[in-house]
Image (cartoon, helix red, strand yellow):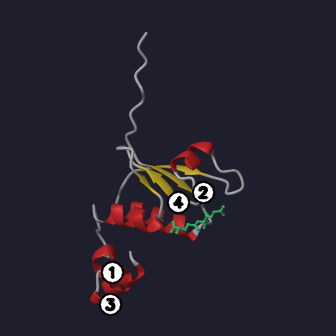
């Protein structure tokens, strides 16, 4: 008998509703109109599958359908908003001052 492995269609976001970093990741995904599955975690009892993807153990973490793992809210926001930025959040943040600050911080 052949059981096909389920193919992941949508990004999976490990999140925690009260975490501001997870909130900004969720906001960017929603603003960009990207459908995603959310797994609400308890920070006191993190799921082993999330820790396997990201041993640092903080949220948000996002698993993309191609297997890539984004472990920082900044990276999730960037990934979402460079695809679609209807309100110009990302575009408006690319000021010379911000870009210089990001470069200084190594972002
Ligand atoms: N630099 C990270 C910070 C994420 C972060 O610190 N998340 C907190 C919750 S707000 C966390 O998961 N902490 C781990 C813990 O409490 O065990 C990002 O921007 O995604």
Residue farthest toward the bottom in the current orientation of the protein: 97
Residue at numbered disc 4: 60
**Gap between marks 1 and 3 measured at Cα:** 9 Å
Earlier sequence position, callout 4 versus callout 3: 4
**Gap between marks 3 and 2 measured at Cα:** 32 Å
For label 3, the crowd category at 10 Å Cα-Cα, with few meaning under 14, some 14 to 19 and many 20 or more, is: few
In this view, 94 is above or below 28: below
- Would residue 105 appear left or right of 15 to someone viewing this image? left
**Residue at x-position 43% and y-position 9%:** 1
Rendered image: mark on residue 93: 1
- Of badges 1 and 2, nearer the viewer stands 2
- Would residue 18 appear left or right of 84 to someone viewing this image? right
For the C terminus, the quadrant is bottom left
Earlier sequence position, callout 3 versus callout 2: 2
Residue at numbered disc 3: 97
Earlier sequence position, callout 1 versus callout 2: 2
Where disc 3 sits, the SS reads helix
Is 36 or 79 nearer to us in this picture?
79
Residue at numbered disc 2: 57
Q: How many marks?
A: 4
């Amino acid at each position: 008998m052949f059981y096909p492995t389920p193919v992941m269609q949508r990004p999976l976001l490990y999140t925690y509703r009260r975490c501001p970093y997870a909130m900004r990741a969720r906001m960017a995904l929603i603003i960009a109109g990207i459908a995603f599955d959310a797994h609400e975690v308890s920070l006191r009892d993190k799921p082993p599958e999330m820790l396997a993807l990201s041993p640092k153990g903080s949220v948000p973490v996002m698993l993309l359908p191609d297997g890539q793992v984004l472990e920082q809210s900044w990276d999730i926001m960037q990934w979402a908003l460079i695809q679609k930025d209807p309100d110009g959040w990302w575009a408006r943040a690319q000021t010379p001052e911000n870009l210089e600050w990001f470069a200084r911080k190594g972002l």
